[in-house]
Amino acid sequence: MPASGLGFILTRRLVRHQHEEKVELWLATDAGPVCIYSPPQKNVCFVLQQYSQQARELLQQHRLQVTVEPARFTTLTQQPVSMLRYSPDYLLTQAARQTLQQHGIELYEGDIKLTDRFIMERFAFGSVRYRAWPQPNGQLEQAQIKGSPYRPSLHSLSLDIECNEHEQLFSVGLSSPVLRHVLMVYDTPVATDPQTDFSLEIVADEGRLLHRLIELINEHDPDILLGWNVKQFDMAVLYRRAKYHRIPLALGRNGGLLNVRQWDNGTFVELPGRAIIDGIEALKTMAWHFDNYSLDGVASELLAKNKLVKEADQLAAIKHLYKHDPLQLAKYNFEDCELVNQIESYAQLIDFLILRSTLTGLDISRPGGSVAAFLNVYLPRLHRTGYVCGVRPADGGLASPGGYVMTSQPGLYDYVLVLDFKSLYPSIIRTFKIDPLGLVQGLQDPENAIPGFKNACFSRDQHFLPDIIANLWAQRDEAKRQHDKPRSQAIKILMNSFYGVLGSAGCPFYDPRLASSITLRGHEIMQTTAKWIEAEGLTVIYGDTDSTFVHLTGINSRDEAIKTGKLLEKTINQKWQQKLRDEYRLTCHLEIEFETCFDKFFMPTIRGSEQGSKKRYAGLVEANKPDSLVFKGLENVRSDWTRLAKDFQQTLYLKVFSNAPVTQYITEVVEGIRRGQFDAQLIYRKRLGKPLAQYIRNIPPHVRAAMRAEEKNSAAGNTPQFQRRTSVEYVMTHAGPQTLTYWDSPLDYEHYIEKQIRPIAESILPSIGLCFDSLIKPQLGLF
């Protein structure tokens, strides 16, 4: 009898058994983890029919067993193709693809992973209904799968390691609702105290620590291993230390071994049966943004908590604790695990990744992947119409026009309305039927098609993407009604990614006619909307992608402004519905929303010019409510400006918006800087974009500070402190930029006044008839 049930895909990989390749899927089910194996699989790709025989011969030269089969498919340019099936040896396939390209033969769909194809072609995505047959060895083979709405409940375990610069392990922390444990290598017992809320286990050596780690993880059997930089650091170090000791690191289910491969652009981590989720990757995938993605930085911003060790030279502090206070190091190690769990709970990272997987079929452990998500959703549908997808352009493709951005009318305003088109690009795709298949079919019958841009036209009834968008839109509306934030966010990110995918040279559906028909239609919509608003006697002072900023005159109250905004929303929506119905015979899915009323609003000029800036403004939503102050693109939201500059801008703008005097405040700040009153707020922070040695010609201040610090580290025999992507905290002194660890020169206060305070003040003071120089001039002679 076959085994069957519902499950969520935790891991997928291709395994070889008795000269056959099979897809192994580990599923989380209500009854516990289940492992199933597909029938034997072959790699599939397509070549133009005219090259099929030549392609087979070239592939066979690379020892690939290849069969050529007739196919009912054509390319999107109507060229017939043949199907090639061959053994999935990755290295041989890469070499074979290069050989084919050298002979001018393009492989269609040759880079789609076999595991992904097996899942997507069955519309299975993240959750599946499965049926498989038990074998004498206990394995479930010949698995059949199809999509299912199953929603799993997954168990996660947070992991964090501490080690020295030689990657010798000090300790490993583990934290979950059922396991609160720290393993530590130490040569003597370590006394704990009654307030320690985890168990501390001392082991004799690193080998024993690795063995105990394997035992603990398999005993508690989590679905997910969670951590901070866990793939690039923790798992990579554990893998190398286990290899050094010749210990099979069987952290996976059924004795599955950890596999780690690293290269310049990333780290590949595979662990059968357990997903590995990195907190930083997950937050970025969810579109969270932080000045500092360190665990301490994110925990501080989200949880108002900090790590127990905050020294600038963290490695030295950890080594000191290990030698002199191992219990404190264990607390630090465990606290890091706890912080990761609390961030996950706050941001609902795992829920988001589960939902993203069920919507797109993306591996739960995978960051990003918008092109892969699009292929998973779109390609199986395309195949059923007899087409294969295109080929990624080797030259990177032509750039598509960006979003509409209007030159602003700078100034200080009372009552500015912001009206936003709800999900503008997805609504354009849905309304104007923009779609790869729709483009092919539309070009065949242009008289009855919907016109696009760059000579594109789209079929009115043969398409997939508009319907995919409509389905996602309905699901998001339902998620909002149920207050399901992770699902709503997952759908929003997915819908908005479709435009970027169609305009990306990394996508085999890339076509400048597709992306341009979205963005240029957006330009048209924004410009037409602005004309309609101005026809109502109002003034549009700025427009950006999907937002229109409208200045109201003759308004005496916030209530009156809001009433105007709501009426404007209704008017514009009615006009678009009528225009699309009359001119295009289309149902309008565009929807503009009155989003915000700013009681006070400021649009600056471009620095050193009288021309209005773009993507930079500030506004006070409600007068007398300082917490409703909004900054966009100004210094207050830049991570590389000092805390003093941000605080100064916040206070100065609030005073201007409140019609309060500013002269005394500005002079007090300038005097305070020169007196050393704000030294603690004059710290810059900027991340290194590449290794220090690669900065040769253009060496910015944070790099100069880091280079000087590393010279001193080397002279003192200390370990290197600044690596690629490390954040450098530094100050500007009379001796140039210096890191906090090697700060030995007086601060250059005039630098801060000229480079931090002056630009902020000069951006807004002219709007109230003041000049920065005239305010501080009387003070110049005092210092």
Image (tube, rainbow, N blue to C red):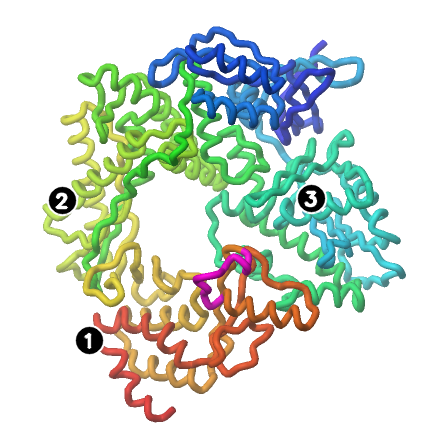
Circle nearer the N terminus (3, 2): 3
Circle nearer the N terminus (1, 2): 2
* Residue found at the very far bottom of the displayed protein: 782
Question: Disc 1 versus disc 3: distance between alpha carbons?
Answer: 59 Å
- The reply to whether residue 348 is in sight is no
Image quadrant assignment for residue 585? top left
User: 10 Å neighbourhood of mark 3: few (<14), some, or many (≥20)?
Assistant: many
Question: Disc 3 versus disc 2: distance between alpha carbons?
Answer: 56 Å
Image quadrant assignment for residue 510? top left
Question: Disc 1 versus disc 2: distance between alpha carbons?
Answer: 32 Å
Examine the structure image and report whether residue 692 is included in the region drawn in magenta.
yes
Circle nearer the N terminus (1, 3): 3
Q: Quadrant of the C terminus?
A: bottom left
User: 10 Å neighbourhood of mark 2: few (<14), some, or many (≥20)?
Assistant: few
Q: Which region shows up in magenta? A: 691-702
**Number of disc labels:** 3
**Looking at the image, do the residues carrying marks 3 and 2 touch, with CB atoms under 8 Å apart?**
no
Circle 3: element type: strand
User: Which percent across, then down, holds residue 518?
Assistant: 28, 34
Q: Which mark is residue 157?
A: 3
Residue located beneath label 2 in the image: 531
Residue located beneath label 1 in the image: 769
Q: Which amino acid is tagged 2?
A: Lys
Q: Which amino acid is tagged 3?
A: Leu
